[in-house]
Amino acid sequence: MREFVFTVEYEAGADELMDLFIDHPSLSARSMAVHATDESVWGVEKVVGAPDVLAEFDDRLERVTDDSNATGMCGAPISEWRYEILSSNAESRKVFSLRSEGDGPRSIPLVAATHVGDGLLMRTERRDDQFRWRMLLEGTVSEIHEEIRDTLRDGLSLTVERLGTPPCLLEDGRVRRTLTPEQKSALEAAVEHGYYEDPREQSVTDIAAEVGVPSSTFQYRLNRAEAWLAKQFASDSIGVDVAADLDPDDIEFIQ
């Protein structure tokens, strides 16, 4: 078994949904499950972002799935595209989607399923202008790579990151080692402006105004930074094995 990791980069304007990730770098998405045949792909994706950005994500997702002229990554017409929001809160969505494509050059998971058949495992991540794919498979990947590279739509480009043994795919996604720059800045601003003093010296709204960030965005970044610190403490100090993406909604979803 080998792990094949590659990234599709999107130019602004090439894809309406990816444009939202480009415009809002704090928005991210990670698959919880991805499955495909040579005609269809389906799975569950967790999307994380600020509340106002997620509201825009909801609107765009509804719009693109209703577009009768929509095409896949490589240009084949989308013959069916449906989705369901399985769970939703202020900071995340869990979205099931199923997409089928008609005749023509088909998208990455369909191409991979055609060449690999049974046993293909996939994981995806989306952030900024990048849509990263990880595949665990047997056999050669040259035909998959060549077919995708030669048929990607205008505005999309392919970069291969690694091909080798599968440990990276099999890592269990434990607590992240660093905060994002935006989360770190929010936490530093909160400390600097006395947010954690007793009594509290300034509110989130006050600090957001000071640093020139919308209050909802600042609150989101601070919440994510605080969650990261709590998970680090639990993982490093108490010895609790904490999954980076686990939240109450995840537990409810799994049950």
Image (spheres, rainbow, N blue to C red):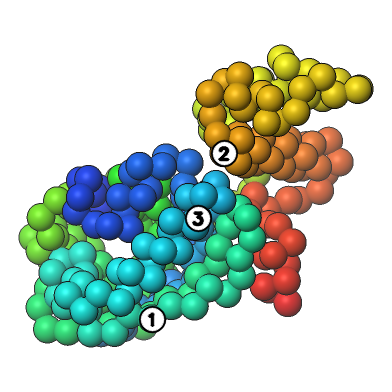
| Horizontal relation, residue 12 to residue 128: left or right | left
Question: Neighbour class for label 2 at 10 Å: few (<14), some, many (≥20)?
Answer: some
In-front residue for pair 148/195: 195
Tag 1 residue: 82
Q: Is residue 80 above or below residue 168?
A: below
Q: Position of residue 114 (x, y in %)?
A: 23, 80
> Which of the image's four quarters has the N terminus?
bottom left
Tag 3 residue: 54
Q: Residue farthest to the right?
A: 198
SS for tag 3? helix
Answer with mark 1 or mark 2, whichever residue precedes in sequence.
Answer: 1
Q: Residue at x 33, y 69 (%)?
A: 63
SS for tag 2? helix
Q: Amino acid at mark 1?
A: Arg
> Cβ–Cβ below 8 Å for labels 2 and 3?
no
Q: Residue farthest to the top?
A: 192
Q: Residue at x 68, y 25 (%)?
A: 206
Query: Disc 1 versus disc 2: distance between alpha carbons?
Result: 30 Å
Question: Neighbour class for label 1 at 10 Å: few (<14), some, many (≥20)?
Answer: some
Query: Disc 3 versus disc 1: distance between alpha carbons?
Result: 18 Å
Determine which of the numbered discs, if any, sits on residue 217 in the image.
2
SS for tag 1? strand
Q: Residue at x 85, y 24 (%)?
A: 200
In-front residue for pair 141/247: 247
